[in-house]
Image (cartoon, grey):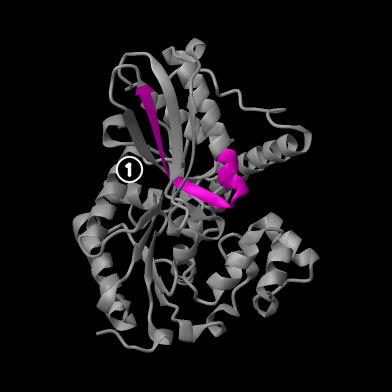
């Protein structure tokens, strides 16, 4: 039995693969092991590194460093054009390895996994042994070059922070009894959810340190953040697991019965994309990310048709619309008289784990569109992705882990 003192228990295990893409390349090619490696999208001096091995990082090369600058900082660095198919296969093997030790609660990104702990697993000692078992399993069944940092915490957010505190190949435990002392040395930017823009906003309100941040009340932190995310952050930093509270809302959905003139396949798809756009706007307004999307249709003389897929946690309308477009290809023939969409796997903004390639410009774009539509009227601006586009080859994916059939 785990200890009865709640201050000693952990409830989440968070796994973060270290320099994942570069490590996969080193695993695939033994000649690269122990050498500085950078993964790039194309062979060009003007492009940037999208992943860097720890040998390269030791020379000052980082994710986002231009190739020509990386070459200057580390003359012996090897540049490898990324093959996402390899990364997806490796990701799937890692998930399988983790699942053999403990159930996976959420695949947060291609290189991050969250597991909810139950029963005896919540004992910090038992959970620590479980973490070492996972590391050993990945090494033996996936590859010795693939290392991960694992964090334990009373909630998913703190477990993620713990995983970031000791890299590479690290292990850190944050128990409720360790709070807030263990967080005080951290810079604000070490907290998921505090990027450059949010740091500027907090600094403008006199918040420069973790000590100051933690001294605020839930109401003050909400005001500082400018949204309910600040209040959620207050609870998370104190070890509360708010997932149960926010989890009451399972999905965000919209549906519509089509008038006769819109019951052809392409017209029905256009309506479905519009519903998806509305659902995505609601998702952002309510402060969630979604990790799944499903659609359904009712066809004349047939049973209802449904389809669904997983996506990387996102708020991006275009990701959802592209998923809808792909799923719609499988709809049976017939006249469609009702369509609907649901965004599921909701994750509060404070718990969102940005992917390796999450582009802040996209987020700023759709939030700006939301603000303009709210100010000047619905649909003053809208996405051009409501019409079909040509198929494109598989690239480095950051919003969705492709199905094996796509590789």
Say which of 66 and 315 sits in front. Answer: 315
Q: Is residue 345 above or below residue 166?
A: above
Q: Residue 203, located in which quarter of the rendered image?
A: bottom right
Residue 346, horizontal then vertical, whole percent:
46, 51
- Magenta highlight on residue 82: no
Q: Indicate the secondary structure of the residue bearing disc 1.
A: helix
Q: Quadrant of residue 316?
A: top right
Residue 189 coordinates in the image, percent (x, y)? 62, 64
Q: Taking 394 as reference, is 197 left or right?
A: right
**Could one spot residue 75 in this view of the protein?**
no
Which one is in front, 262 or 404? 262
Q: Residue at x 26, y 66 (%)?
A: 134
Q: Which residue is mark 1?
A: 88
Indicate left or right for 373 with 26 as reference. right
Q: Residue shown at 67%/58% (left/top)?
A: 227
| Magenta-colored stretch includes residue 289 | yes
Q: How many marks?
A: 1
Q: Is residue 220 left or right of residue 354?
A: right
Image quadrant containing the C terminus: top left
Q: In the rendered view, would you say 339 is above or below 245? A: above
Quadrant showing the N terminus: bottom left
Image point 43% across, 53% down: which residue?
36
- Percent x, y for residue 140? 19, 60
**Dot 1 crowding, Cα within 10 Å, few <14, some 14–19, many 20+:** many
User: At x 23% / y 70%, what residue is drawn?
Assistant: 133
In front of the other: 143 or 327: 327
The answer to whether one can see residue 337 in this image is yes
Query: Bounds of the magenta span?
Result: 280-298
Depth check: give the residue in front, 279 or 337: 337
Image location of residue 369, percent across then percent down: 69, 36
């Amino acid at each position: 039995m785990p200890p009865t003192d709640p201050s000693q228990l952990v409830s989440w295990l968070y796994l973060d693969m270290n320099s994942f893409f570069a490590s996969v390349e080193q695993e695939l090619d033994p000649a690269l092991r122990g050498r500085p490696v950078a993964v790039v999208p194309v062979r060009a001096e003007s492009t940037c590194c999208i992943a860097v091995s720890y040998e390269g990082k030791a020379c000052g090369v980082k994710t986002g460093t231009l190739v020509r600058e990386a070459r200057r900082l580390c003359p012996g660095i090897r540049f490898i054009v990324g093959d996402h198919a390899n990364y997806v296969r490796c990701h799937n093997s890692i998930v399988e390895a983790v699942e053999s030790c403990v159930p996976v609660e959420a695949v947060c990104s291609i290189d991050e996994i969250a597991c909810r702990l139950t029963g005896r697993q919540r004992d910090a000692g038992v959970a620590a042994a479980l973490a070492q078992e996972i590391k050993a399993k990945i090494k033996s069944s996936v590859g010795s070059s693939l290392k991960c940092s694992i964090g334990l915490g009373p909630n998913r957010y703190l477990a993620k922070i713990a995983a970031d505190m000791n890299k590479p190949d690290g292990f850190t435990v944050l128990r409720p009894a360790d709070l807030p002392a263990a967080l005080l040395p951290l810079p604000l930017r070490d907290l998921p959810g505090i990027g450059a823009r949010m740091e500027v906003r907090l600094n403008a309100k006199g918040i420069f340190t973790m000590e100051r941040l933690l001294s605020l009340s839930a109401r003050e932190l909400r005001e500082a953040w400018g949204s309910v995310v600040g209040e959620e952050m207050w609870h998370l930093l104190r070890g509360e697991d708010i997932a149960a509270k926010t989890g009451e809302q399972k999905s965000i959905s919209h549906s519509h019965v089509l008038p006769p003139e819109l019951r052809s396949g392409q017209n029905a798809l256009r309506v479905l994309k519009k519903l998806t756009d509305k659902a995505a706007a609601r998702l952002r307004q309510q402060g969630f990310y979604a990790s799944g999307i499903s659609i359904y249709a009712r066809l004349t003389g047939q049973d209802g048709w449904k389809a669904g897929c997983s996506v990387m946690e996102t708020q991006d309308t275009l990701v959802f619309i592209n998923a809808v477009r792909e799923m719609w290809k499988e709809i049976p023939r017939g006249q469609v008289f009702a369509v609907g969409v649901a965004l599921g796997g909701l994750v509060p903004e404070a718990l969102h784990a940005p992917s390796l390639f999450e582009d802040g410009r996209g987020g700023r774009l759709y939030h700006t569109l939301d603000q303009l539509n709210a100010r000047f009227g619905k649909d003053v601006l809208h996405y051009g992705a409501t019409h079909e586009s040509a198929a494109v080859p598989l690239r480095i994916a950051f919003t969705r882990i492709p199905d094996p059939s796509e590789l």
